[in-house]
Image: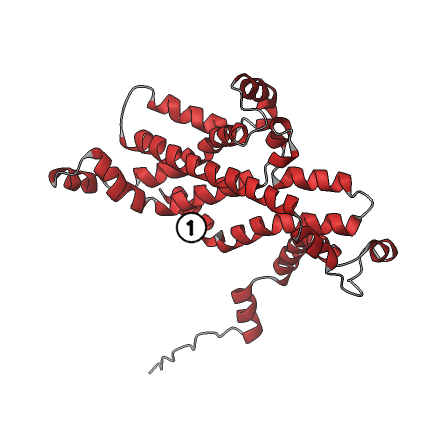
Amino acid sequence: MTTLTAKAPSRQSRPARDRQQWGSPATYFIAFVFIALCLGPVIYIILGGFRDNSQITNSPAGFPSPWRFDNYAEVLSSSTFWQQVGNSAIAGIATTIGVVVLGLMASFILARYKFAGRGAMYSLFAAGLMFPMTVAITPLYILIKDLGLMNSLAGVILPQIAFGLPVTVIILVPFLRAIPDEIEEAASIDGTSRLGFFFRMVVPLSLPGVVTTGILAFVASWNSYLLPLFILGDQSMYTLPLGVQAFASQYSVDTAKVLAFTSLSMIPALIFFTLFERRIVGGLTGAVKG
């Protein structure tokens, strides 16, 4: 008589299970190296604003000793800094509104309606992703000059809206295509017009993509340097990137104050991007799934 014995399942050792759960240490080491390379310059600029020129000269990579707060206080008490913050905020908010409104309407047409040339129009927006502003800066300058928009925020906002539309359309079209046709048919049966369906159903359902494109447009406008450099000549109209360049030229011998001005100019964009990071990732994920 043969006795059958059940073979106990093999159990992995605890270190092996931990390695499978957390991954390879080499992966974390490489990730920390890349994080350090990205955050290192930002931390250096922020800490440099709390030092004086002698500290930076004697120990370029050292910590503030003692901490100096007068550099940040002088920048924050400057009316020029807040004027440039206001110009950047106006340009960023206006660009974001224009990109989101026009992009959402164009994406709705491309995603929900069939007409001749729809594919070519969508390809045109896709091709816009490969057309950098650097290439178009000379004709843009001539066009803005002919329109009489030189040295005005409108001359910066309109081109930024145009160059922000390709990304917006590429992200939003999959969102709008993923909306079931049954919802539109049910809304039509209930007597909802096409505009009513757009505002009552399309806009709420595509909100993750709208938020994503709005954040990307605002951050791109806030960090824009080349276009304002060509369009804005009056310092009273400068945005923050131009203000940093002008401030660095004016206080070239005061490195600590320049670092303080630079850190204050980039902190709003960093905070804004950090707060809405999950929105950006969620919106891009939804676009890929759509």
Depth check, front residue: 5 or 150:
150
In x, y percent, where is residue 4? 36, 79
The image quarter in which residue 191 lies: top left
With respect to residue 238, does 28 lie above or below? below
The image quarter in which residue 179 lies: top left
Q: Residue at x 52, y 51 (%)?
A: 272
In x, y percent, where is residue 146? 54, 16
Depth check, front residue: 164 or 86:
86
Left or right of 279, for residue 2? left
With respect to residue 275, does 123 lie above or below? above
- Judge the density around disc 1: few (<14), some (14-19), many (≥20) Cα neighbours within 10 Å: some
Q: Which residue is drawn at 80% across and 42% down?
A: 252
* SS category of the residue bearing label 1: helix
Left or right of 228, for residue 281? left
For the view shown, which residue lies furthest in the right direction? Answer: 58
Residue that label 1 marks: 282
In x, y percent, where is residue 154? 51, 30
The image quarter in which residue 287 lies: top left
Disc 1 residue type (three-letter)? Gly
Q: Which residue is drawn at 64% across and 40% down?
A: 241
* Colour option used: secondary structure
The N terminus lies in quadrant: bottom left
Left or right of 82, for residue 181? left
In x, y percent, where is residue 126? 45, 29
Q: Can residue 4 be seen in this view?
A: yes
With respect to residue 277, does 22 lie above or below? below
Looking at the rendered structure, the number of numbered marks drawn on it comes to 1
Q: Can residue 129 be seen in this view?
A: no
The C terminus lies in quadrant: top left
Q: Residue at x 61, y 58 (%)?
A: 27
